[in-house]
Image (spheres, rainbow, N blue to C red):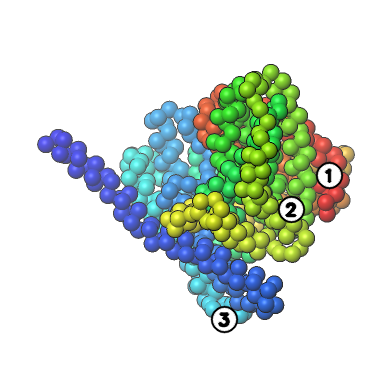
Amino acid sequence: MAAAGAADAAALASTPPKLAARLMRPLEVVSALLLAVIITLLLVGVAARYVFSLPVVWVDEVVSLSFLWLAMLGAVIAMHRNEHLRLTLIVEKLPAPLRGYVQAFALCAVAVTLLALAGPALEYTRDEWAIRTPELSMPNAWRVAAIAFGVIAMLGLVLSFALRTVALRQLIVAAGVLGAAALACQAGSVGLQSLGNLNLVIFLVGVVTLCLVAGVPIGFCFGLATLSYLGFATTVPLSVVVSRMDEGMSSIVLVSVPIFVMLGCVLDSSGMGKAIVDVLAALFGHVRAGMSYVLLGSLFIVSGISGSKVSDMATVAPALFPEMKRRGHKPPEMIALLATGAAMADTVPPSIVLIVLGSVAGVSIAGLFQSGFVVAMVLLLALMLLARWKARHEIMEGVRRAPWVTLRKLLVFAAPALVLPFLIRSAVGEGVATATEVSTIAVLYTLVIGKYLYGGLSARQVYSMLVETASLSGAILLILGTASGMAWAIAQSGVVQQLSGFLTTLPGGPWAYLAVTILVFLLLGCVLEGLPAILLLAPIMFPIARKLGIHDVHYAMVVVVAMNIGLMMPPIGVGFYVACRIGEALPDDVMGAIWPYLVALVIGLVVIAAVPWISTVAL
């Protein structure tokens, strides 16, 4: 009887996840279809404009509607899969009993954020019903209803997950703490409003920090902090947050984000990335430090296709690590080089970070793409010099140059993959097409080439990649939306003008400001995944840089490189732990090995900051 009772209990416990999975399948299918529709419509638009000289004016409206629904459905799928970006380092080090309460707090914080957004999201949808799109005359409510649907669906998932995975006592305590804090803020709202900009520190710094430490997903940290600030310290209606989310997630430029994520998935699954790695190994693998050069060169080229650091590392590491181990490379050194190489390659177009930065800071994406290639070369050189010095004792016994016949075969096989990053860079840099248009063409190119030259992709694989892309894009775009709301709140407070006045009068002028920028983004890159740091500070920092006469593209390169270095800095950097997971090594073992490589990148960053010509020569 005891065994039967345990089995029944296990069956009951597994029912909610199974039910949730069944309910999620239709959403996954719809999200996959939406992404396919977006790619198809953009391709139709490109063909109509460039081939037939007949622009299809309604394409952007349908793409905009589909894109916001894709973003919110992707956020729901990411919630179901527990894939929203968050800082887990501190929570994982807590004692087990305390960890349960902290996890309950995090779940309650997410639920409170969604609950606070639900009403304003429905109100915003109702208000947008009267607004019609210019070409198809559709009610704009059809588009923005995606926000309300996504918020309510995520709320249901969070509540279900909390009740299923956390003890009721822990949930009650966590809910009580949040409720008491809300009541205290409500009771003291008059006093809070009298504090002025000190509320920015209390809510937008204090609440965000507390939630980050507790493991609340980054997007919800920003959302809860902004809602708390506006609700308790101002008289601004909360519907403003929803409207800013809409604006932050709906830019047509950002449509290229999920498409480049999809491109990275195709690259991994089709074998195109491995073909590039094999060619470089045949060319340089026989020289001392050759495999390190191959790893860095592969990251450089593959990044120009996928636009994703995780995709880059996952493609390169399995192909090269076995041979590097045979030559005497130690796993911590290999993973350190992998992590810093991925940080170096994030300025190589098509970088998702550059696309988002160009969108929020009003900087030419074509200019960023042109400059990023040169900047990455400087960082590549710094890492290659260090790798050569470290490989002075490398075991080279039995290493031979690849025969010309083998090299020729590999070059022919990899040629279609090798030309793609240069096509992307040239098309955007020369103004032939936008980043969004190029991304759709690149996806079609890789799907066709992957099918006929690299073994092909099954329909099941393509569907899985579409859903995976929706999930990752939803997690990213939700952060963009909530960070946009927070950035608006900061701008409306007037603190930007005060900060501008202070920073523009720093002794040292532009050079002092660049030094401050490097320190700020190194630190923020450690704590936040790259995009949130850019979204929060770009609207503040770039106007000040312009006042000081710093070139937009030069400043953007300093920001992106500093942020990427911070992302790989232990003990907090998120990218550092991703690299350790891909390389299957303990972070404690890698921590000591990565610092010389980070120092090499910092030296490269200082050179880039000190010599603006590096960033502007290609413009």
Seen from the viewer's position, the closer of residues 588 and 345 is 345
Along the line of sight, the residue nearer the viewer: 347 or 474:
347
Instruction: Look at 73% across and 60% down and name the residue there.
Output: 427
| Mark found first going from the N terminus, 2 or 3 | 3
Image quadrant holding the N terminus, namely: top left
Query: Would you say residue 250 is visible in this rendering?
Result: yes
**Left or right: residue 57 compared with residue 603:** left
On the image, the x and y values in percent for residue 208 come to 57, 44
- Ranked by sequence position, the earlier of labels 3 and 1 is 3
**Amino acid type assigned to the residue bearing label 1 in the image:** Ile
Question: Which image quarter: residue 594?
Answer: top right
- Numbered mark located on residue 614 in the image: 1
Q: Residue furthest front?
A: 405
Q: CA distance from mark 2 to mark 1?
A: 13 Å
Q: Amino acid at mark 3?
A: Ser
State how many labels appear.
3
Q: Which residue is mark 3?
A: 137
Label placed on residue 8: none
Q: Quadrant of the C terminus?
A: bottom right
Helix, strand or loop at mark 2: helix
Q: Amino acid at mark 2?
A: Phe
Residue 390 is situated, as x and y percent measured from the top left of the image, at 70, 23
Locate residue 376 relative to residue 112 in the image: left or right: right
Pointer 3 and pointer 1: residues touching (CB < 8 Å)? Answer: no
As helix, strand or loop, the secondary structure at mark 3 comes to loop
Of residues 341 and 193, which is closer to you in this image? 341
Looking at this view, is 282 or 213 the one in front? 282
Q: In this figure, which residue is indicated by the disc labeled 2?
A: 369
Question: Is residue 254 visible in this depiction of the protein?
Answer: no
Taking the image as shown, residue 175 lies to the left or right of residue 254, namely left
Q: Residues within 10 Å of mark 1 (few under 14, many from 20)?
A: some
